[in-house]
Amino acid sequence: YLKGQYVSAHGDVISHVNISSVHVTDGGTYTCSGENSAGRVVHSARLNVYGPPHVRDMGQVSAVAGQTFSVTCPASGYPIHKIIWKKVSTLLCHLIQPPRLHNMEERWSFVCQPATVNEVHTNGTLVVEQVTREADKGQYSCTASTKGGHSDTQTPHRQSHGKVRLCWQWPPVLQPFHFEEKLQAGDRAGVTCLVSKGDPPITFTWEKDGRSVEEVEGVSVSSMNHFSSSLMISRLTASHTGHYTCQSCQPLGTGRSLRCPRCLWYAYMPSPTTTTTTTYH
C-alpha cells in the first residue's frame, strides 16, 4: 500500500491510496474521511478482486448490555455466493446471492434460523438488537463461500472462515450529584461524579454550559480511583454560575471510539451571594 495526499492549485486536498500488486486479500471495503473544524465527511467503496474467498481475523469486540451490536464479516474474493454467520455451533443467519448476480451490494436476501432479532445486512454485517449477556456472549464465526465449479459429483463450495469473540460490558450508571444551595463569593465548592454500576475502563469528562471545564478559570478535576471523578472550584465568583455536566464513557473494541450510554448527569451552580459590611461612625 502507498498512501499520500497533496493540495491542488485550486486549494483542494487530494488524498490517494495505491496498491502496486493486488492480491485477493486486498479486496474489501475502503473508507476515506475528511475532517475540519466544521465537521466530518466519510465515503466508502468496495474493491472486488477475483479469486477464492478469504475472511480476515476479526479479533475481539465488546458489546454493551441493552444496546445494538453489529460486526461486519470482512470477506474478500469475488464473486462471493454466500455469507453465513454462526455462534459456536448454532446457525444464526446467512446471505444468499441469486445466480448471475455478482455484486455484493445488490439484491442479497438473508435468512435467520431460528427466528430471532439477529439480522444480516447486505454488506455481510451481523446486527444483534437489545444485547443480553446470557444469550449473546461467546464466539461468532462468519463463512464466505463461492461455487468452485460444477461436476457430476457436485464440487463443494470453497470456503473461508473468520472468528470474532464478543465480550461484555455493563454500561456506566452515574449517581446524582448536587451543589450546595447557599454559596457565597470566595467560598470553595465541589461535587463528585460516581459510577455506581458499569465495567472499567471508564473515562470521565466535565463540561460547564457545553464547554470543557479546562477552559474555566479556577476549576480543577481530580480522580482518586477508577470509578469516580471530582470537580473543585477553589474560589467562587459569579462567572462560575451555570450547568456542570459529568460524562462517563467506555471504550469499546479497539481504536479511539467511545460509547457513552446512560452516562450523563448535570447540576446547576447558582450565582454565589456577596456579603456587604457597612460601618457607621
Image (tube, rainbow, N blue to C red):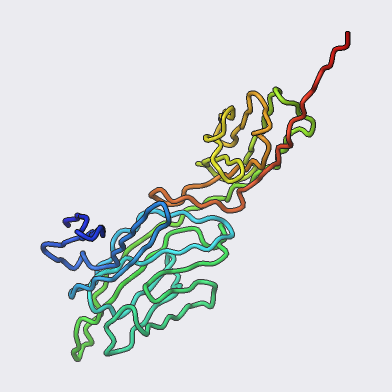
Percent of width and height locating residue 157: 25, 79
Count of numbered circles in the view: 0
Q: In the current view of this chain or complex, which residue is farthest to the right?
A: 281
Q: In the current view of this chain or complex, which residue is farthest to the left?
A: 21
Task: Report the quarter where the C terminus lies.
Answer: top right
Give the quadrant of residue 199.
Answer: top right
Above or below, comparing residue 119 to residue 151 in the picture: above
Between 61 and 91, the one lying in front of the other is 61
Percent of width and height locating residue 269: 71, 37
Residue 86 as seen in the image, left or right of residue 98: right
Give the quadrant of residue 186.
Answer: top right
Percent of width and height locating residue 67: 56, 60
Q: In the current view of this chain or complex, which residue is farthest to the top?
A: 281
Between 245 and 270, the one lying in front of the other is 270
Above or below, comparing residue 129 to residue 99 in the picture: above
Q: In the current view of this chain or complex, which residue is farthest to the front?
A: 281
Above or below, comparing residue 237 to residue 41 in the picture: above
Residue 265 as seen in the image, left or right of residue 111: right
Query: Going 35% across and 75% down the picture, which residue do you hit?
Result: 83
Between 234 and 17, the one lying in front of the other is 234
Query: Going 68% across and 24% down the picture, which residue do you hit?
Result: 188
Give the quadrant of residue 12.
Answer: bottom left
Query: Going 32% across and 63% down the picture, which residue do you hit?
Result: 162
Query: Going 19% across and 91% down the picture, which residue do you hit?
Result: 152
Task: Report the quarter where the N terminus lies.
Answer: bottom left
Percent of width and height locating residue 55: 28, 65
Above or below, comparing residue 31 to residue 53 in the picture: above
